[in-house]
Image (spheres, rainbow, N blue to C red):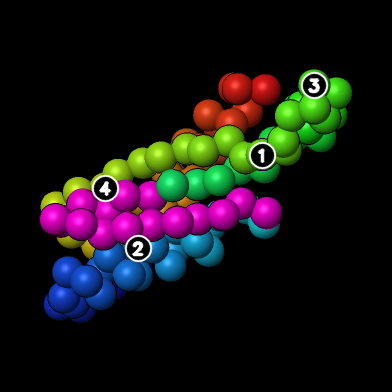
Amino acid sequence: MQVSNSSSLELIQLFTNLLWANTPEGWILKDVYFQNTLFVTMFVPKTTTEQNELLSLNMELGFQKIRRSFDLEIIQKRKNDLWGLAADCVEEIRGEVENDK
C-alpha cells in the first residue's frame, strides 16, 4: 500500500484503522495518540473455560488487557507497509493470548 505525503495524524488514523481491520471479532480496540506516540489497548474476551472458572469463584467475567505503543517514527518508516505492521501487531497479540491459556 503506497501512502502519499500524508500528515502525521492521517498516518496514525490509517494505521489505527488497519489495526482495527485486523482485529478478531469480539476484541475491543482503544487508542490514544499523545506526544508522537500511539497507545493501543486491546481487550480480549476471556475463554469459556476461564469464564466458567471466574463464575465458579463468583468473580466478574472480563477481558484480558494487552497494551502496545507505537512511536510515530516507526509508523512513518513503515508507511508503505502499514497493513503488514498492523497484521504483525495483531498476530503478536494473538500469540500472547494463546500462550496465556
Distance between mark 2 and mark 4 Cα atoms = 10 Å
Q: Nearer the viewer, residue 39 or 87?
A: 39
Q: For mark 4, give the secondary structure.
A: strand
Viewer-side label of 1, 3: 3
Quadrant assignment for the C terminus: top right
Write the residue at 17% across / 69% down: 8
Q: CA distance from mark 1 to mark 3?
A: 13 Å
- Residue indicated by mark 4: 70
Q: Residues within 10 Å of mark 3 (few under 14, many from 20)?
A: few
Tell me the distance, in whole angstroms, between the alpha carbons under discs 3 and 4.
37 Å
User: What's the amino acid at mark 3?
Assistant: Leu
Camera-near label (2 vs 1) is 1
**Camera-nearest label, 3 or 4:** 3
Magenta residues span 26-40
Find numbered disc 2 in the image and state the secondary structure of the residue it sits on.
helix
Residue at the image point whose x is 44% and y is 64% from the top: 18
| Residue denoted by label 2 | 15
**In 3D space, how far apart are the residues under numbered discs 2 and 1 (Cα atoms)?**
27 Å
Position in image of residue 19 (x %, y %) = 45, 58
Query: Which of the two labelled residues, at mark 2 and mark 1, occupies the earlier sequence position?
Result: 2
Mark closer to the chain start, 4 or 1: 1
Nearer-the-camera pick, 83 or 39: 39
Residue drawn at (47%, 37%), measured in percent from left and top? Answer: 66
The residue pinned by badge 3 equals: 57
- Helix, strand or loop: magenta stretch: strand
Asked whether the beta carbons under mark 2 and mark 3 sit within 8 Å of each other, the answer is no
Look at the numbered disc 1 and give the secondary structure of its residue: loop
- Residue type, numbered disc 1: Gly
Residue 20 percent location from the top left of the image: 50, 61
